[in-house]
Image (cartoon, grey):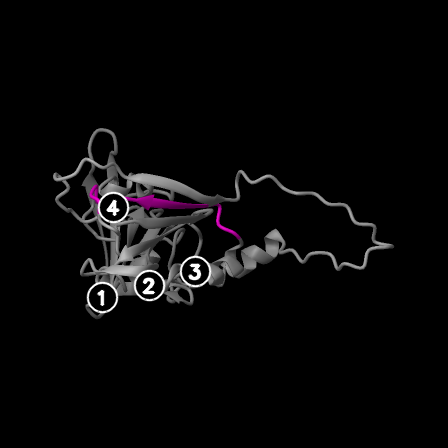
Amino acid sequence: MRTCAVAVLVVLVVGGCADSEESSSIDAIDTTASTAAPTSTVLSTTATEAATTTTTNPLTSTTAPPTTTSTTEAAESASTIVLRADGLGVVPFGTEIDEALVVLTDLLGPPTSHELHTNVWGDESSYGSFHEVKWEGLRLEFIDWDIDWTPLDSPVFSYWTTGRSLRTPEGVGPGSLWAETAATYGDAAKAWQEDCGEYSGIYHFLSIELEGEGYEHIAGYAYFGWLTDDPSDPASSVAQMEAGREAFPQGC
C-alpha cells in the first residue's frame, strides 16, 4: 500500500495518493548504498496526441472507412469488467503486460497514459521497475519482480485501484453505500477511521477480506479502499477500491 494517504487504496482518487513517487509504493528496501534517483518515462498518452485528419471521396475511394468505437460502446464494454481480488475482469494478476493491455484496450479503449518508472529501489539492479497505466478513473501497475524479489522476464499485472462505477462479482464498488457493502460481505467487511495528519485529515478506510490466504502480493485475497464519510453515516459510500500487491490495510 502507498505510504501517502492510503494506498489502497490503495491512493486517493486515481491520480491522488496512488500516484505518489515510485519509491513510496515499494516495500522497504535498504537503498543507502546508492544515490541513483528513480526515473520515469512516458511511453504513451492519448491525452496529448495530435489527431490525424484525412479526407476521402466516398464516390471514388475503394478503401473501406476505418472502424471506430463510439464512446457509448466503450462505456458498455467497460461496464462488463468485474473488480476481482485476484485481478480485473478476465485478466488475473500475474498476466504479462502485453497480453493484459490487449484485452483491456479492447474493452476500455487506449489508455490515457502509460509510464515506465525505473530504478525504484534506488540501486543499479537490472530490475526494479514498474509500468503505470491509466484510464479515466482506473489505474494499474505492472511490476518486473516476483513475490520473492526474483526478476521477471516481462512485467506482470500486480495491482489496480479505481473510483469508477465498476463492481465486484457481488455487486459492490465505488458508489455503493457502506451499509449495503457491509450487508453483502458480512463479517468480512470492516471500516475504521484514522487521523492522517494536518494535511491529509481524517480518512475512513475499508477492507473486505475474503476466505483463503491467497498469494498475498501478487494474486491478492482482499479488497481495500476508503469511504466518503464515517461508516455510521447512512450516506457513507465507497469512494475508492483497490486490490493487488500494493493494496494493504495499514491506513495512513
Circle 1 sits on which residue? 215
Overall secondary structure of the magenta stretch?
Answer: loop
Q: Which residue is mark 2?
A: 93
Mark 2: which amino acid? Phe
Residue 127 left/right relative to 87: left
Point out residue 49 in the picture as x, y percentages from the top left corner. Answer: 56, 40
Label 1: state its secondary structure. loop
Q: Which residues fall within the magenta stretch?
A: 110-124
Which element is circle 2 on? loop
Residue 244 visible in the snapshot: no
Q: Pointers 2 and 4 in contact (CB under 8 A)?
A: no
Q: In the figure, 178 relative to 15: above or below?
A: below
Residue at 49% x, 63% y: name it: 80
Is residue 167 found left or right of 68 in the rendered image? left
- Disc 4, SS: helix
Q: Nearer the viewer, mark 3 or mark 4?
A: 3
> Does residue 208 show up?
yes
At 63% from the left and 54% from the top, the residue drawn is 70
Tag 3, which secondary structure? helix
Q: Mark 4 vs mark 1: which is more N-terminal? A: 4
Q: Residue furthest right?
A: 59
Separation of marks 2 and 4 at Cα, in angstroms: 17 Å
Q: Which residue is mark 3?
A: 98
Residues 71 and 180: in front is 71
